[in-house]
């Protein structure tokens, strides 16, 4: 896939929220309550980002393109209830696999 902004080749991956080992050790914060959000620049409205979904990253201009989770094969995790995209191989929240 090519970047829609600069036309360079994009790399496929996934979106995650991580806390550094130093922060976890010093504060005990494991990021369990943290969630990545998209904040609209005009309205300030915050929308939770769909963690664990397929993301394409442009190494040239640093653009990220996130594929949505509304596909027909998406499901809810049997362990925690988080929405799991059809392309995922584990729950992005609790790691449950099938």
Image (cartoon, grey):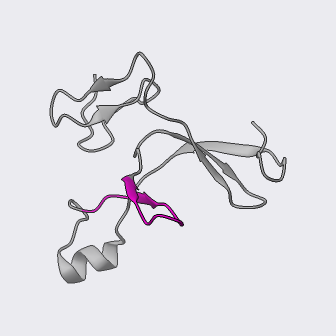
Tell me if 59 is positioned left or right of 81 in this view: right
Q: What's the magenta bit mostly, secondary-structure-wise? A: loop
Q: Residue furthest top?
A: 72
Residue 96 is covered by the magenta coloring: no
Residue drawn at (53%, 65%), measured in percent from left and top?
A: 42
Give the quarter of the figure containing the N terminus: top right
Q: Is residue 31 above or below residue 85?
A: below
Q: Nearer the viewer, residue 71 or 93?
A: 71
Q: Position of residue 66 (x, y in %)?
A: 55, 43
Q: Is residue 89 above or below residue 15?
A: above
Specify start and end residues of the magenta stretch as a single range. Answer: 34-47
Q: How many marks?
A: 0
Q: Position of residue 79 (x, y in %)?
A: 15, 32
Tell me if 16 is positioned left or right of 90 in this view: right
Q: Nearer the viewer, residue 97 or 62?
A: 62
Q: Position of residue 76 (x, y in %)?
A: 25, 27
Q: Quadrant of residue 36?
A: bottom left
Q: Is residue 25 above or below residue 74?
A: below
Q: Quadrant of residue 84?
A: top left
Q: Quadrant of residue 67?
A: top right
Tell me if 72 is positioned left or right of 23 in this view: right
């Amino acid at each position: 896939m090519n970047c829609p902004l600069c036309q360079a080749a994009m790399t496929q991956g996934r979106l995650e929220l991580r806390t550094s080992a130093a922060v976890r050790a010093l504060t005990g914060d494991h990021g369990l309550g943290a969630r990545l959000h998209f904040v609209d620049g005009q309205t300030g409205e915050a929308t939770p980002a769909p963690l664990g979904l397929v993301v394409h990253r442009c190494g040239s201009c640093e653009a990220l393109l996130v594929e949505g989770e509304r596909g027909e094969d998406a499901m809810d995790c049997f362990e925690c209830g988080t929405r799991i995209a059809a392309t995922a191989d584990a729950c992005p929240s609790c790691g449950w696999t099938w």
